Image: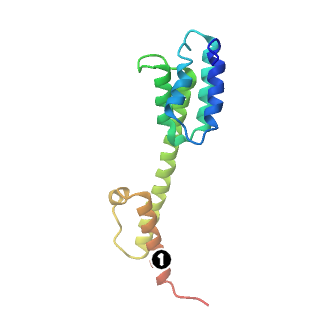
Amino acid sequence: MFSATPELEARIRTLQLIRRAELQFDAVVAIFSLLQSWREIDSHKETLNDIILYMSRVFDARQRKWFEQAIRTGLRINAEEQMPTCFEALLEEGRAEGREQGREQGREEGLLMGRIRTLQEVLRQPVTPQQTLASLSLQQLQSLAIQLQDALEATRPMTR
């Protein structure tokens, strides 16, 4: 298409690709293949960073591994070669998001475990060991907490 200006062609193909309903791995790889010489040509590196940032904002976060593989394939990046700074930042951002989600889920699970144990004490039931509760999924903990809350509500006298 624009063989003399691969950075322009890569940008145009990116915009065309984003408008499609379904992403195609080969199309993403082709975009990054145009910019394989990013190490030597500054305009390619700037374009590469722009495209990575743009696509990372448009793509669903669940496709991050897919996107990472498309970039690596298109640029023929080996593990020991230096990756583009923008790409490293994108990967670290994804890792940080995952860590934050994990911490948030951990806090929620911890609060639920405390609530369950407190409800069991109030209801004079045997208190489930922490290790047992820790082995349950978030959904199972929520379900157990609801059951115990319902049991507590059932023991209260009705007021009118």
Please tell me which residue is depicted at 59% across the width and 42% down the height of the picture.
21
Question: Residue farthest to the top?
Answer: 40
Q: Secondary structure at mark 1?
A: helix
The relative height of residue 87 versus residue 24 in the rendered view (above or below) is: above
Q: Position of residue 80 (x, y in %)?
A: 41, 17
Q: Nearer the viewer, residue 37 or 56?
A: 37
Q: Position of residue 63 (x, y in %)?
A: 51, 39
The relative height of residue 86 versus residue 108 in the rendered view (above or below) is: above
Q: Is residue 8 left or right of residue 93?
A: right
Question: Residue farthest to the bottom?
Answer: 160
Please tell me which residue is depicted at 55% across the width and 27% down the height of the picture.
89
Q: Is residue 156 left or right of residue 12?
A: left
Please tell me which residue is depicted at 33% across the width and 71% down the height of the picture.
126
Please tell me which residue is depicted at 65% across the width and 14% down the height of the picture.
5
Q: Nearer the viewer, residue 18 or 51?
A: 18
Q: Residues within 10 Å of mark 1 (few under 14, many from 20)?
A: few
Q: Position of residue 117 (x, y in %)?
A: 41, 66
Determine which quarter of the picture holds residue 48. Answer: top right
Q: Where's the C terminus, which quadrant?
A: bottom right
Q: Nearer the viewer, residue 141 or 1?
A: 1
Determine which quarter of the picture holds residue 60. Answer: top right
Q: Is residue 126 left or right of residue 15?
A: left
The relative height of residue 112 versus residue 46 in the rendered view (above or below) is: below
Q: Where's the N terminus, which quadrant?
A: top right
Q: Nearer the viewer, residue 100 or 64?
A: 64
Residue receiving disc 1: 150
| Colouring scheme, one of rainbow, by chain, secondary structure, one colour | rainbow
Check disc 1 and give the amino acid type.
Asp
Disc count in the image? 1
